[in-house]
Image (cartoon, helix red, strand yellow):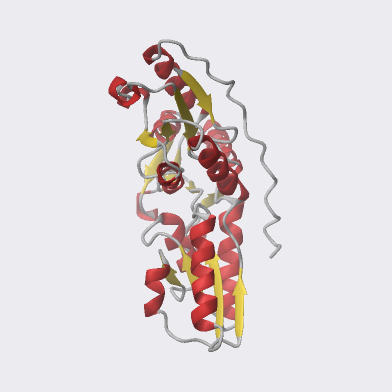
């Protein structure tokens, strides 16, 4: 059985930046409180906790003088409250997420009805909604658009980890149904390039193999999206967090298996899964794990 790896997968720029920031802060201070899981990957969270980064769920639980804002961001009022309490705010919000927060807020200030294409209840989405003071309308699919109130000015943004095709479907429906009623329509494609690149690489690989293994946290939106896209591409797809979840029965009669991983999955977890796959294969020829090239994010003030 041959093992092929997606050309682009694993840690994205925002996650790498956040992990390095927390590691440095924990080393300097000995202990630091992270407001929510830094990333949606249990293995990474456990490793950071071992370094002294304790996960808390409210500012009342913060121990010490510093609090870390996770990659998915928080409503701006949370940051203001932390500063009012005299806490040092270590902001690990992904720069791409921060850009969406700023765009959404500017749209609201300019009188636009903001449509946020994303998963209701996701940490990133809740944070963005908070930057609009609760005025953004969250839609998970085109079916949700029928409840949207009529508006003369409409602005659309997307959660960073959404499918570009699904986002296009939402925009197309808004154009078809709303353009004659809206005097202005502004669309910001805020799906990050790392997400798009990983999705494209995963789909391309899924079309070449019989089985796809998607590695990443169960609560990781971008990892779940990869699994959905691989399944849609025609490969039998299995989402695993650790090597211990692999089952030999998945690969019966399989000559080629593909592997991809979410943006919050570290290289060492990917390698562990690949090694476990090798032990299940009669003959495995994995391709070398390559670090995906990352484009620098836009400066926070742009857009």
Q: How many marks?
A: 0
Residue 159 appears anywhere in the view? no
- Residue 243 seen from this side: yes
Q: Position of residue 28 (x, y in %)?
A: 56, 33
Say above or below: 302 vs 276. Answer: below
- Residue 131 in percent (x, y) is at 51, 68
- Expressed as whole percent of the image width and height from the top left, the position of residue 69 reads 49, 50
Q: Quadrant of the C terminus?
A: bottom right
* 94 lies above or below 46: below
Residue 198, image quadrant = top right
Quadrant, the N terminus: top left
| 121 or 259, nearer to the observer | 259
Q: Would residue 18 be found to the left or right of residue 146 on screen?
A: right
- Front position in the image: 166 or 282: 282
Q: Is residue 88 left or right of residue 223?
A: right
Residue at 44% x, 45% y: name it: 34
Q: Residue at x 59, y 76 (%)?
A: 107
Quarter of the image for residue 149 reads bottom left
At x 61% / y 42%, what residue is drawn?
13
Name the foreground residue: 45 vs 4.
4
- What residue is shown at x 52% (from left), y 15% (from top)? 285
Q: Could you tell me residue 112's position as x and y percent?
A: 56, 81
């Amino acid at each position: 059985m041959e093992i092929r790896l997606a050309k682009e997968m694993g840690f994205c720029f925002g996650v790498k930046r956040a992990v390095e920031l927390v590691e440095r802060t924990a080393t300097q201070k000995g202990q630091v409180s992270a407001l929510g899981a830094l990333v949606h990957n249990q293995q990474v969270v456990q490793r950071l906790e071992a370094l002294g980064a304790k996960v808390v769920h409210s500012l009342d639980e913060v121990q010490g003088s510093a609090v870390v804002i996770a990659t998915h961001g928080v409503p701006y009022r949370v940051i203001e409250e932390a500063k009012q309490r005299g806490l040092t705010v270590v902001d690990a919000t992904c720069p791409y997420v921060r850009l969406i927060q700023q765009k959404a807020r500017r749209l609201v200030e300019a009188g636009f009805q903001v449509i946020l294409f994303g998963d209701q209840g996701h940490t990133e989405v809740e944070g963005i909604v908070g930057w609009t003071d609760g005025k953004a309308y969250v839609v998970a699919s085109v079916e949700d658009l029928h409840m949207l109130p009529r508006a003369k000015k409409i602005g659309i943004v997307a959660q960073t980890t959404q499918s570009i095709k699904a986002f296009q479907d939402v925009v197309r429906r808004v154009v078809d149904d709303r353009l004659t009623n809206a005097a202005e329509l502004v669309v910001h494609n805020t799906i990050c390039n790392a997400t798009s690149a990983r999705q494209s690489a995963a789909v391309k690989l899924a079309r070449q193999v019989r089985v796809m293994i998607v590695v990443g946290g169960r609560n990781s939106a971008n990892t779940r999206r990869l699994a959905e896209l691989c399944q849609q591409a025609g490969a039998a797809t299995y989402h695993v967090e650790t090597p211990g979840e692999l089952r030999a029965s998945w690969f019966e009669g399989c000559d080629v298996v593909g592997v991809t991983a979410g943006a919050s999955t570290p290289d060492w977890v990917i390698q562990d899964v690949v090694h476990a796959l090798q032990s299940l294969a009669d003959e495995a020829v994995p391709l070398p794990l390559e670090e995906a090239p990352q484009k620098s994010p836009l400066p926070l003030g742009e857009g």
